[in-house]
Image (tube, helix red, strand yellow):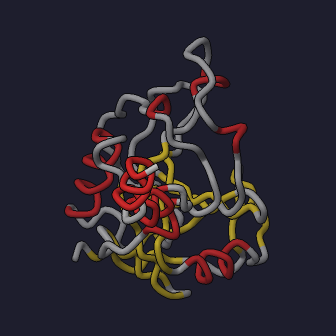
């Protein structure tokens, strides 16, 4: 009995620490943001997952350092799905991009509400500068297998840690078609600048 009591006393201080790890990742966020997207709707602070998605994060940060995202649009907005940007300037001209990166969607991260992922074509390894923010849990975008572009998934590389209210405002904007592009905001949603704290 004495040994059992001693074991309980030794393990009791560990209980709160174990409990903390069971909390959702969002609740544990105490770090400073890695990136702040300043938009004409407000600021969106983002944490990047460098260890899980090193190539995607390095790619995103290089575009940010180069000023590529400054003055670009969230050009595709679909409520209850996602907001996509990083490829078109305010005149709706496509910006030049570097070579595509390898798809890291098999990193175990999921396309849950508030996460950032690399946008791409049907080719799983075609992501360049464009990214999107999930405004809902989009598990159908998660990696399932490497058999096709449909099942490869979309690589999550970060998450919003502050400013989801801004994202929610953006996701509700009125959209229309512009040329061959659908779901384009009627009033431009601009990433004015990207701050790297």
The residue under the point 54% across, 61% down is 23
Residue 86 visible at all: no
Furthest residue toward front = 1
Q: Quadrant of the C terminus?
A: bottom left
69 with respect to 1 (left or right): left
Residue 166 spot, x, y in % from top left: 59, 82
Within the image, what quadrant is residue 32 found in? bottom left
Front residue of 43 and 190? 43
Residue 107 visible at all: yes
The residue under the point 42% across, 32% down is 104
The residue under the point 53% across, 45% down is 119
Within the image, what quadrant is residue 16 found in? bottom left
Front residue of 37 and 143? 143
151 vs 74: above or below: above
The residue under the point 53% across, 64% down is 92
Residue 113 spot, x, y in % from top left: 64, 60
Numbered label tally = 0
């Amino acid at each position: 009995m004495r040994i059992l009591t001693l074991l309980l006393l030794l393990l009791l201080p560990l209980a709160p620490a174990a409990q903390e790890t069971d909390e959702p990742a969002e609740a544990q966020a105490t770090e400073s943001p890695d990136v702040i997207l300043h938009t004409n709707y407000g600021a969106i602070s983002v944490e990047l997952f460098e260890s899980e998605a090193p190539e995607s994060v390095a790619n995103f940060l290089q575009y940010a350092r180069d000023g590529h995202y400054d003055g670009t649009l969230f050009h595709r907005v679909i409520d209850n799905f996602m907001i996509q940007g990083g490829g078109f300037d305010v005149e709706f001209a496509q910006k030049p991009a570097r070579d595509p990166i390898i798809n890291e969607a098999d990193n175990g991260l999921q396309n849950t509400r508030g996460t950032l992922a690399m946008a791409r074509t049907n080719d799983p390894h075609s992501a360049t500068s464009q990214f999107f923010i999930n405004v809902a849990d989009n598990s159908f975008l998660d990696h399932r297998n490497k058999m096709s572009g449909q099942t490869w998934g979309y690589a999550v590389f970060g998450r919003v840690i502050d400013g989801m209210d801004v994202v929610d405002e953006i996701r509700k904007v009125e959209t229309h078609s512009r040329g061959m592009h659908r779901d384009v905001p009627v009033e431009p949603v601009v990433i004015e600048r990207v701050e790297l704290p």
